[in-house]
Amino acid sequence: MPGGPEADRLQDRRLAGTTRLIEFNRVAKVYRAVDGRPVRAVDSVSAAIGAGEFVSILGPSGCGKSTLMMMLAGLLSPSEGEIRFKGEPVFGPQEGCGIVFQDAVLFPWRTVLSNVMLPGEVRGLPKAEQERRARAMIRLVGLAGFETKFPHELSGGMQQRVSIARALSLEPSLLVMDEPFGALDAMTREQMNLELQRISLDLGATVVFVTHSIAEAAFLSDRVFVMSGRPSTVREIVDIDIPRPRRIEQMNSDAFGGYVSRLRDLLDHRGEPA
């Protein structure tokens, strides 16, 4: 994202009247290479995300977008700077944050219902409350009737729906998703994009969605954070001004094509060979 006071003022206007749920303040992550040299993966990210927004973090493989997501989720600690969630510094996994990874990571010996009940079980909720929440989320993701099925009996898309239901079972205010549809075929991925849009609109939760798909980012997002080359930062934030709910057919519109072209141009000039 362009730095300096002007960029901050632009973001302030975009988020005017919106509660800032997440704030990145000069966040960086440095790893140690095998030879001991420091490798700067993420560099000086400063940005804010409002409550109820759908924000995609867009960039090519290896650019640091998953590292940024892991820091937001509290699974990695920043080397520099600070992340705030609901005004409080993030020092570890946060109550109120649900996480969905590229692989569904379901327990094969548990049914759909018992997989979705797991977070409530870990939290120590009464069993009746665990089941009430789990059944509600299973209905929300369109899997009512599959409660007694095991993961091996489900398609890849259905397994990811279970993973999303599990992440939502504790009613989080933030859903963090790391390329959750990357392993799915094109048709299933489109369907899951529609389902995710429906779910996010129904719940009003904030979603931070990591992807390397330009079309997916443009279709799903209110705003897209475009990552630069490594050491990566947010090169620019692009607002997607297309009314919701969005239909797959809108991907053929001139407006949608304009956003895709804009995002592609930003990625092509990220400081690395295209």
Image: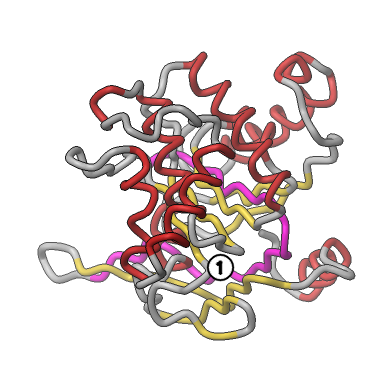
The furthest residue to the front: 128
Q: Give the image location of residue 96, x and y in percent.
A: 53, 69
Q: What residue type is labelled 1?
A: Val
> Which residue is found at the position 40% from the left and 71% from the top?
74
Q: Judge left or right: residue 226 versus residue 14.
A: left
Prevalent SS, magenta region: strand
Q: In which quarter of the image is residue 29?
A: bottom left
Q: Quadrant of residue 141?
A: top right
Residue range highlighted in magenta:
38-61
- Would you call the spot at circle 1 few (<14 residues within 10 Å), some (14-19), or many (20 or more)? many
Q: Is residue 255 above or below residue 115?
A: above
Q: Quadrant of residue 245?
A: top right
As for residue 53 lying within the magenta part, the answer is yes
Disc 1, SS: strand
Q: In this view, does 91 lie above or below 113?
A: below
Q: Give the image location of residue 123, x and y in percent.
A: 37, 71
Q: Judge left or right: residue 77 versus residue 239.
A: left
Q: Judge left or right: residue 228 versus residue 113.
A: right
Q: In this view, does 272 lie above or below 154?
A: below
> Which residue is found at the position 28% from the left and 42% from the top?
106
Q: Give the image location of residue 61, x and y in percent.
A: 39, 40
* Of the pair 58 and 209, the residue shown nearer to us: 209
Instruction: Name the colouring of the figure.
Output: secondary structure
As for residue 140 lying within the magenta part, the answer is no
> Which residue is found at the position 39% from the left and 48% from the top?
116
* Location of mark 1 (residue): 45
Q: Give the image location of residue 97, x and y in percent.
A: 50, 65
